[in-house]
Each structure stands twice: as structure tokens, then as C-alpha cells.
Amino acid sequence: MSEKSESGMVIRTSAPGWLVSLAKAYRSQTSVTLVDDAQIGINPINETLLDMGRKANLSQREWIAVLVALGVGVAGTYLLVMAILDPEPYSKITLALATGALLIAGGGFSAIRVLVGHKPPNIRVSPRGEFEIYWG
């Protein structure tokens, strides 16, 4: 999926699961070098991860993996709402509240934000045409 270099992690578009690796790097704000060796024509300067995934013509299996990650957040939201609406005292449903909040924080809304609208703050194009994505 990805490899390490002197400047950090290298993600190649020809590698399976490259979009998932890139999404994890965005979420954790890890500096990466993105190499479009599959000649997809992506441009992280102007595109979201969702746009890049569409251009890459991801397989059904890859889109299912993305949707499963998003489903974690939906499940957490449902659990949290149902726990709040439950007539039992909060002291009895603390575990359900905590679990719902953890699921939401762990995958759901952050994954949606990353895929749909989050762009990295700093991108530099190297002389070899590689995108260097970094924060700070």
C-alpha cells in the first residue's frame, strides 16, 4: 500500500488500497508523498479524496470498504441517539452513550469530512511531478 522514504511515507496510485492509505494520512495529518504512477490524473491541490476516488475508477470492493468505514459513524450516531431517547436514567446507559460517542469519533463523521470536503493545507509539487502533502 505505502512505503517509507527519507521525507516520510510514499503512497503510489498503482498500489492497491492507495486511497484508504491517503485518507488515513489526511485524518492523522501525516506528511506523505503521493506518486501518480498509475497516471490517473489526480490533483490533490484542487480535489477532495472523493473526487480522486472517482477519477481513479475504484472497484466495487474499494468503494464498499469506504462505505463500511462511513457506516461505523452512522452506527455510532444511531446508538447515541437511541441511548439519549431511552427513558432509563443516564447512569444505566453510560456504556451505550460512551460507545456511541467513540464510534462517531473513531470513524464516521471524520471519514465523511475527509472524503467529501477536507483538503490538506500544504501541497508542493516536486520536480519529478510527485505531490508532497504536509501539515504545518
Image (cartoon, rainbow, N blue to C red):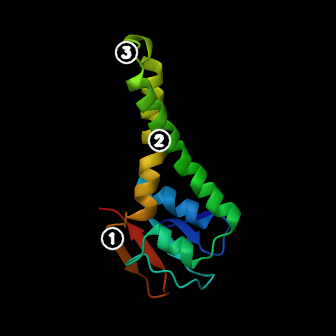
Closer to us: 3 or 26: 26
Measured along the vertical axis of the image, is residue 91 above or below residue 14? above
Q: Residue at left 59%, top 76%?
A: 56
Residue behind mark 3: 90
Q: Tell which circle, 3 or 2, labels the residue nearer the N-terminal end.
A: 3
Q: Give the CA distance from mark 3 to mark 1.
A: 44 Å
Tell me where residue 86 sits by quadrant. top left
Which of the labelled discs sits on residue 122, or is there none? Answer: 1
Q: Give the CA distance from mark 3 to mark 2.
A: 22 Å
Residue behind mark 2: 106
* Circles 3 and 1: CB atoms closer than 8 Å: no
Instruction: Give x and y (percent) for residue 11.
Output: 56, 69
Q: Give the CA distance from mark 2 to mark 1.
A: 25 Å
Label 3 crowd bin: few (<14), some (14–19), many (20+), radius 10 Å: few
Q: Residue at left 41%, top 13%?
A: 88
Q: Is residue 30 visible?
A: no
Closer to us: 73 or 36: 73
Q: Secondary structure at mark 1?
A: strand
Label 2 crowd bin: few (<14), some (14–19), many (20+), radius 10 Å: some
Instruction: Give x and y (percent) for residue 40.
Output: 58, 83
